[in-house]
Image (cartoon, grey):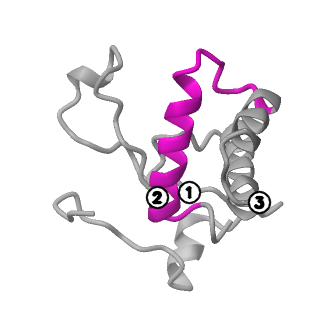
Amino acid sequence: MNKIMTPEFSKEFKHHFDDYISTGEKSWNASKFVKFVKGSGLSKTNEDLLIARHRVLGEFGANELFEGNGLTRVDKNSKWGSKIEQDFGVAEIITFERDPLTINQLNEVNDVVTLLPTTVI
């Protein structure tokens, strides 16, 4: 997760994902995405990272608009996104804990970074 949920890798994933979608395939089709990635001439490491990131998309919903910094870019081309002035939606948290801590508990141990709306990311 540390390698695939970063701002840098999120840009790379979006690039490859957009290429995949341009072929007419469905975003959720994991086997077709794997076939697409395996035929793209990338290194085995990059293939594995892209496939892992696609699994996060399918299983957790962190789509190609997820920036890797806790924010998801608003799709200005969508019906609702064209009416929204801001560039990002609400902050998102993905947790793998069976009994996750609350936001207040996370704040107590300094695991939450507060971003101000005026912060440029």
The amino acid on which the numbered mark 3 sits, given as a three-letter code, is: Lys
Please name whichever residue, 115 or 75, is drawn nearer the observer in this view of the structure.
75
Residue 12 is inside the magenta segment: yes
What mark, if any, has residue 93 been given in the picture? Answer: 1
Q: Residue at x 31, y 21 (%)?
A: 77
Could you tell me the amino acid type at mark 1?
Ile
Q: Which mark is residue 70?
A: 2
Q: CA distance from mark 1 to mark 3?
A: 29 Å
Nearer the observer, 48 or 80: 48
Query: Which mark's residue is nearer the viewer, 2 or 3?
Result: 3
Q: Quadrant of residue 83?
A: top left
Q: Earlier in the sequence, mark 2 or mark 3?
A: 3
Identify the mark nearer the N-term, 1 or 2.
2
Residue at the location (59% across, 75% down)? 105
Q: Main secondary structure of the magenta part?
A: helix
Q: Is residue 98 left or right of residue 60?
A: right
Which residue is identified by label 3? 44
Question: What amino acid type should be assigned to the residue bearing mark 2?
Answer: Gly
> Left or right of 31: which side holds 25?
left
Q: What residue lies at 16% left-to-right and 61% top-to-bottom?
A: 118
First along the sequence among labels 1 and 3: 3
